[in-house]
């Protein structure tokens, strides 16, 4: 009887852990360096909330950008305003970010670095995932 109970507990634990495993995928339109920073920031966000992140995650969190404005600030500076939507299943959160750089890739990188894993928006997203 003990073996059966132990087996059931282990199986339930495995199911719970599998349900909390995510994979983060950045949209192909995001420059590679910025995508790498975004995946890193979202990984920090999720792991601090008790989730695990892997390449073969059970659920996929997609990072989908919408550029809301793009303008030249000067001859050598470009400003981007981006609404970055993180979504998985029915849960989604929009992170508005802005970046100014020498080119579009640089502006993206600077904007990506503004997502803070311990911000209120990040904590709200993690709470939505928990519920």
Image: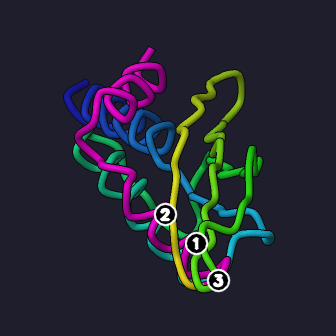
Q: Is residue 45 magenta?
A: no
Looking at this rendering, what residue extends furthest in the front direction?
74
Residue 54 locus on image (x, y percent): 48, 65
Check contact, mark 2 vs mark 1: CB within 8 A: yes
First in residue order: circle 2 vs circle 3: 2
The x, y position of residue 6, in whole percent, is 25, 34
Does the CB distance between marks 3 and 1 fall below 8 Å? Answer: no
- Residue 76: image quadrant is bottom right
* Element assignment for label 3: loop
Pick whichever, 23 or 43, lies toward us.
Answer: 43
Structural crowding at the residue carrying mark 3, measured as other residues with C-alpha within 10 Å and reported as few (<14), some (14–19) or many (≥20): few
Image position of 38 with respect to 85: above or below: below
Residue located beneath label 1 in the image: 35
Q: Residue at x 74, y 58 (%)?
A: 70
Q: Is residue 125 magenta?
A: yes
Q: Reply above or below: 60 against 35.
A: above
Query: Can you identify the residue that label 2 sits on?
Result: 38
State how far apart marks 3 and 1 are (Cα).
26 Å
**Which is more toward the observer, 98 or 31?**
98
Whether residue 113 sits left or right of residue 76 in the image: it is left
Q: Secondary structure at mark 2?
A: helix
Residue at position x 39%, y 29% in the image:
121
Residue range corresponding to the magenta coloring: 103-131
| Residue under numbered circle 3 | 75
Residue at x 43%, y 58% (from the top left corner)? 53
Determine whether the residue tagged by mark 1 lies in a helix, strand or loop.
helix
Quarter the C terminus occupies: top left
């Amino acid at each position: 009887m003990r073996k059966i109970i132990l087996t059931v507990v282990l199986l339930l634990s495995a199911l719970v852990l599998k349900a909390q495993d995510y994979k983060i995928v950045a949209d192909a339109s995001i420059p590679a360096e910025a995508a790498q920073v975004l995946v890193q920031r979202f990984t920090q966000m999720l792991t601090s909330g008790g989730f695990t992140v892997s390449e073969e995650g059970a659920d996929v969190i997609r990072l989908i950008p919408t550029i809301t404005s793009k303008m030249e600030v000067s001859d050598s500076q470009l400003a981007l305003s981006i609404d970055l939507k993180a979504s998985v299943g029915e849960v989604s959160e929009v992170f508005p970010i802005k970046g100014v750089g020498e080119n579009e890739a640089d502006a993206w990188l600077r904007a990506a670095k503004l997502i803070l894993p311990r911000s209120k928006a990040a904590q709200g997203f993690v709470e939505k995932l928990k519920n």
